[in-house]
Image (cartoon, rainbow, N blue to C red):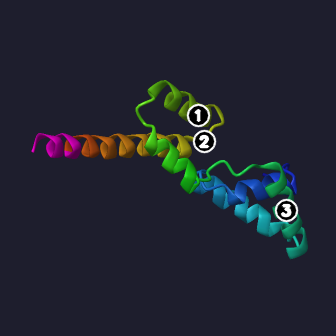
Amino acid sequence: MEKLSDFQLYALTINRDLRYDLKEQALTEFKARGILPERIDQLALEYDEIIPVINSSYTVWERVGIMAFPFIIPLQAILANRQISAGNLKKWKQHWKFVTIGLLIWLVVFIVLLFLLKY
């Protein structure tokens, strides 16, 4: 941990997926270096510029679009796999959740229409 730069150490300390013992080591080293609050703010800005936010969720319009056209499976597969290739598993899972919700909504609409047309 001593060989890491301040930026690398900062990235480790805010990583939520890091094992607990490694995170503790990183935090201990980070505190031992006595980094000033101004430097921490600078590191945070650098981190935000370099590391994109990949775990953001879909906007409302994207959700509506996915749920409105869930039956176009090849298109949905392409859109979902873009998230996987970008390393965003959370957004990939959200995509298929919205496809499933959309299919259920369309199924209910179809059943209600059949029921109404029958009587």
Q: Nearer the viewer, residue 14 or 35?
A: 14
Query: Are discs 3 and 2 less than 8 Å apart at CB?
Result: no
* x and y, in percent, of residue 6 in the image: 86, 57
Mark linked to residue 88: 2
Taking 48 as reference, is 66 above or below it?
above
Residue 115 included in the magenta stretch of the image: yes
| Predominant SS of the magenta segment | helix
Cα separation between marks 3 and 2: 22 Å
Residue at the outermost bottom position: 37
Residue 87 included in the magenta stretch of the image: no
- Please give the count of numbered marks on the rendered protein: 3
Q: Identify the mark nearer the N-term, 1 or 3.
A: 3
Q: Identify the mark nearer the N-term, 3 or 2.
A: 3
Residue underneath mark 1: 84
Mark linked to residue 106: none
Q: Within 10 Å of the Cα at label 3, are there few (<14), some (14-19), or many (20+) other Cα atoms?
A: few
Extent of the magenta region: 112-119
Mark 1: amino acid: Ile
Q: Secondary structure at mark 3?
A: helix
